[in-house]
Image: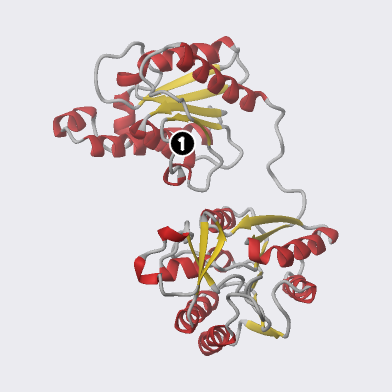
Amino acid sequence: MPERTIAIVGTLDTKGEEFLFLRELIRASGIATIVIDVGVLDPLPFEPDITRAEVARAAGTTIESLLSERDRGKSVEAMAAGAVAIIRGMHEQDKIHGLISLGGSAGTTIGTAAMRALPFGFPKVMVSTIASGNTRPFVGTKDIFMLYPVLDIAGLNFISRRIISNAAAAIVGMVRQERVDAAAQKPVVAATMFGVTTPCVTRARELLEQRGFEVLVFHATGTGGQAMEGLIADGLIQAVLDITTTELADELVGGILSAGPARLTAAGKAGIPQVVAPGAIDMVNFGPMDSVPEKFRGRVLYAHNPNVTLMRTTPEECAELGRITGEKLNAARGPVVFVMPLGGVSAIDAPGKPFHSPEADAAYLAALKRYLDPKVNLVELDAHINDDRFAGEVVTQLLRISGTLRP
């Protein structure tokens, strides 16, 4: 009896030959498979373990209904919902230990929807023609391994056989590897960082690690903030050092690194200790200089590198960010401290630097004070955010409000 089982989610109606090849490779390795058919058409090259009719029922519909409507988009949506329900149920019952899929845009939509329903660390492999493009809508914040097939997934040939073989070997290796305990052995602190706040977060991380904490650093690039909020909601984080709240600026002004409207809310809902700072709220992110929207071309712009252009937030925008931050923190159920660096909020917000604007920083602080509930402790520190003194202060505050949370 094989010791582990891998689920294979796929559209057997259009890619049955490829999925049969994949299934046989996995079985040859001594691992069992459960094939879940998420296609809607005939014919089928082999019988799946879970039929398309079962998947449709799990989504609250029928194959007959989907066929009669002839709406490809609706069919993909329904089969994705059914696959999510089935995969989630099998995982909860410990019936599967890995998930793999192959596909174009529709297959990737369905396969990755099922993968995103699984926890981090669970093996997930997606062979996708989308893998060389924008994968954010498909990967989200989950640890999905995507492999680009070079060709379209349309028949077996010397290239596709090699790619599918590599994918099979990858999922088998992941499933067979010695199990690593996913539970943290130390109290976990989440921290947010950007290139322009790296000195502060690096020093704070070192100080916390010296005291026996495990620090997870999230790159505040939109998905980074979303990933942190997700892990907090999952109960995997015990405290937060949210130094870099820059994603709020992108959400407000329309930059490319927004983490969505739920940013800076999960820790408050969870009631865990959080120390917050306005790291990099002086900037909104865009791509190359020529990608900056025309309406912003007259603003203060800074080429961080050839692929990233930063735009200085105005005093009015900073005031609005202060209001947003204050209102989000007011809703927290746990202890909160906000630490304001009076000497600048990023590496390029300092005397002589391109984003130095005491007026904008003051507008942020004034609005924050106006909206912040007295229950939230506000600390104003005469230091730059990247000074060691500031890093020491945020760590001191986090330790102070963490109470019994000790290594």
Circle 1: residue type: Ser
Residue 203 is situated, as x and y percent measured from the top left of the image, at: 78, 64
Is residue 67 shown left or right of residue 230? left
Q: Residue at x 39, y 25 (%)?
A: 10
Residue found at the very far right of the displayed protein: 210
Residue 105 is situated, as x and y percent measured from the top left of the image, at: 35, 34
Q: Residue at x 46, y 17 (%)?
A: 160
Q: Residue at x 26, y 14 (%)?
A: 43
Please state which of residues 201 and 8 is positioned toward the viewer in this rendering: 201
Display colour scheme: secondary structure
**Quadrant in which the C terminus appears:** bottom right
Residue 376 is situated, as x and y percent measured from the top left of the image, at: 61, 81
Describe the element under mark 1 as helix, strand or loop.
loop
**Quadrant in which the N terminus appears:** top right
The vertical placement of 99 against 139, above or below, is above
Residue found at the very far left of the displayed protein: 68
Q: Which residue matches tag 1?
A: 132
Residue 405 is at least partly visible in this image: no
- Asked where in the image residue 402 lies, by quadrant, the reply is bottom right
Residue 89 is at least partly visible in this image: yes
Please state which of residues 325 and 280 is positioned toward the viewer in this rendering: 280
Is residue 275 shown left or right of residue 26? right
